[in-house]
Image (cartoon, rainbow, N blue to C red):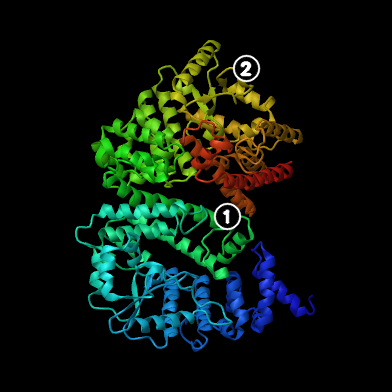
Amino acid sequence: MLNTNQDILILDRFNDLVARNGHRETLDARFIRLRQALPIVTRVLQYLDPFGIDILKHLLGLGEAPVDEVIRYPELATPFFQKGWIDRPFQDNPSPLPRIGRYKRHIWLKILLRDRMNLVPLEHTLADLSELADDVCLKAFDPFPEGLGLWAMGKWGGNELNASSDIDPILFRTDALEPEEADKSVREWLKRFVPPGEPEVYRVDLRLRPEGDNGPLVFRYAKLEEYLMRRAAPWERIAYLRARLVHGDAPDWFESLLNSFLFPPGTDPHKRLEETAGMLFAIHQNASPTDIKRAPGGIRDVEFLVAGFQLAFGRQIKRLRKGTVLQLLDILADEGILEKEKVIVLSDGYRLLRTIENALQADGDRPVFTFPALGTPAAIKLAWGLGVSEEELMQRLSDKRELINQIVFGELVLGAVIASGWSDPQGEKEASSASGRLSSLARRLSGPWGEVGQLIDMAMIESAPSPETVITRLESAVSAVGGPKVWLEGVVGNRKLYREITGLIVRGALLCEEAQNFPGFWGRYGHGLPEPAAKQVDSVSLKETDRQLSEILFRIGGAFLNGHVDVQECTRIWTGQVDHAVLSAMKSSRELPLDSLALVALGKWGGNELAPYGDLDVIPVTTIKDTTELAELQTIVARWMETISLNGKLLMDPRLRPEGSGSPMVVTIDRLQDYIQTRASAWEKLAWSRARVIGTNRDLADKTTSMFASFVETPPAAEGWKVIHNARKRAAASARPNPDRLAIKKGRGGMMDFEFATVFAYWKQGIPFELWQPSLSDRFDHLADLTGDAGWRDAQEGYGILREWEMRMILAGKRSRNELNLKGEAGREIAWILQSDADRIRDHWRKISALGRKLYDISEKSGQ
């Protein structure tokens, strides 16, 4: 109940603070409790203290456990709202004893707030949490026994402790400390982590000690050599990579012993990689797909990749022996073991995963690794706390995990598979498992081809719906270029392109078909995008035209699939090359009268955003008037169009010519003018709104352009709007709305709605025809600048997603590109082609189509 104007003011400002969070009940409850416990909260909002508001917002976003801590001990949290206090995590803090839990949680909260407010990078946060554990553990001993060594393991030992991680200590003793005394001291120490009446200080996990639960609490240094060299399990090598002495005594020979265990003479690097890969597979088998730690593409993948390389090469490269995961990734790049581009991907992905992990764990101060489902309260709170939308966070996480998984499989798993030869006679029996299937494919490559498999990203191939089909494409490509040696030296010789080439083979079935006829394309991939076609067009044979178009398609298609160009740039380049090819084909014809013939390009061709294998909507126009010559020209043009189709690359469609398919193929300039002035329909204004003339006679081109301009730029009368609207309704009705079949072109909210909406808006704004020529994406930009309506920017993004889906379907060899069938096995394949999942595709479509419908309806009504 609001009793005062101040309450209303505070509530209004709180509402502004959390406006973007969709799960308000939780935040409201937290805020009420905080305000009751901390009077400073009211003052911060009342006086709009910017720093205090920032602290409050991030404190609310951290979760229940941090807020509980502040409410439990408000006197410790009040200084947080003073500038400078939060910048000193280990200074100006209360005495640790006897309230060691309170001390720990107070500093813990400061570290998490610093992190959430982006005052320090993630690496500092992880190091601070590890230092806090060091500090608390030492203070809990009071005093620390002589002859005892406290070693940190796991993320604690690696100086990368989580927000709510167990600590994994190992305790060793010298012979100067009696076993009974050591055991008693450690048991007293453990009790101090569970103070009566207060939360647990740390969860202590001692299972990493020698012999595990069956071993003594404190292991004798003198017996460690026998254990490590004779009884230690392979996984313990990875564990001891992170061993760090926190405090106490260690013999002089201990470091030498540890290095002998981790990096023994005669180490087979591939054996170490194989062992690490096997352990990683075992972790994957028991992991939920939403587990950001253990599932493929998770935190463990990056950690095990680094550990595998440490064990494989640490003997020769000493700087690889110690460091954080992020530091070691940089060293791997410096040493040339991992490509710099991959290290950037792994580092960025690891940072995102650890940031999400800390956010999940801070909320309840418990070890959580499961990413919540989209739309759930947990997901809403998590995304708001991190300052992003749920969809953006989910998309970023999905993208990073996929890239991590691909790199780890390619570098760690396949590195072991191929280099070790995989001569295991049981290998074929393993083919039913994920690892067995991968090794089976790897053997198929490495058998007759030797080292070729090392330059193919098997993880990407394994992820395909039909890996066997992809392998067949790969084998065909290698055979076509002249065999493994040519492939190694001329295609992916320095490993820089091996993943991109694999991506092209995996997702570019159409591109592989093009390269079958022209295998030299493989060696030219990655040499930059093709130069724009020369303005001066030479006459070349149709065979050479086909080769040029195929190479352009191969290079820009591969660049698109590998993220080097967006769909707009891809279609712009392709349209330019098609223009060049058509003009060249016109010049090479001995029959076409170039001085008296022009082609009016319509649709996406006219709009400079033609996709490969898209029909070329065209109206042939001529100045010839003689009846006999004109009749002969009809036959010549029809035959020429059929001849130059090049199996669909230049398939011309003249159905949009005046009076349709019942009229002559070629329209005279006089008849076109008469038709436009007397009989043209309103819907043709829209159909011809992207008219662009191609030909060698400049006067004919200018006259034709002028005729279309005067017709198109004039808005239709009221009756004409109805004709256009009814035509759009018929197209939408033919698309058969279905939740499992997304009609992304003709369906309501599809590409047609976006295109129609721009035409309506241009008519309303009175835009002259010369400004109608850019692509639809440029029209959105123009309208956003002209009207100040941000919805046109959103339209640009939404339309771009639809075009990207269309392009991916084309390059995957799916000729049905304007309808996405998301049901059953076909749906799973389409989701894979679009690098998403069916639910996310449906969600994108709902939002995009809602925007498309809205723009169409608003523009159509306002234009009349």
Dot 2: what SS? helix
Disc 2 packing (10 Å; few <14; some 14–19; many ≥20): few
For the N terminus, the quadrant is bottom right
Q: Which mark is residue 662?
A: 2
| Outermost residue to the left | 266
So how many labels did they put on this image? Answer: 2
| Quarter location, residue 733 | top right
> Which callout, 2 or 1, points at the residue further toward the start of the chain?
1
Between label 2 and label 1, give the one nearer the viewer. 1
Dot 1: what SS? helix
> Quick check: can you spot residue 756?
yes
| Quarter location, residue 534 | top left
> Quick check: can you spot residue 46?
no
Q: Which mark is residue 391?
A: 1
For the residues marked 2 and 1, what is the alpha-carbon distance in whole angstroms? Answer: 50 Å
Q: Position of residue 626 (x, y in %)?
A: 54, 13
- The residue located at (55%, 38%) in the rendering is 827
Disc 1 packing (10 Å; few <14; some 14–19; many ≥20): some
| Quarter location, residue 433 | top left
Q: Position of residue 176 (x, y in %)?
A: 28, 84
Relative placement, left or right, of 705 versus 862 is left
Q: Position of residue 506 (x, y in %)?
A: 41, 39
Query: Camera-side residue: 455 or 155?
Result: 155
Q: The disc labelled 2 sits on which kind of residue?
A: Gly
In this rendering, the answer to whether 658 lies above or below 13 is: above
Q: The disc labelled 1 sits on which kind of residue?
A: Glu
Q: Which mark is residue 180?
A: none
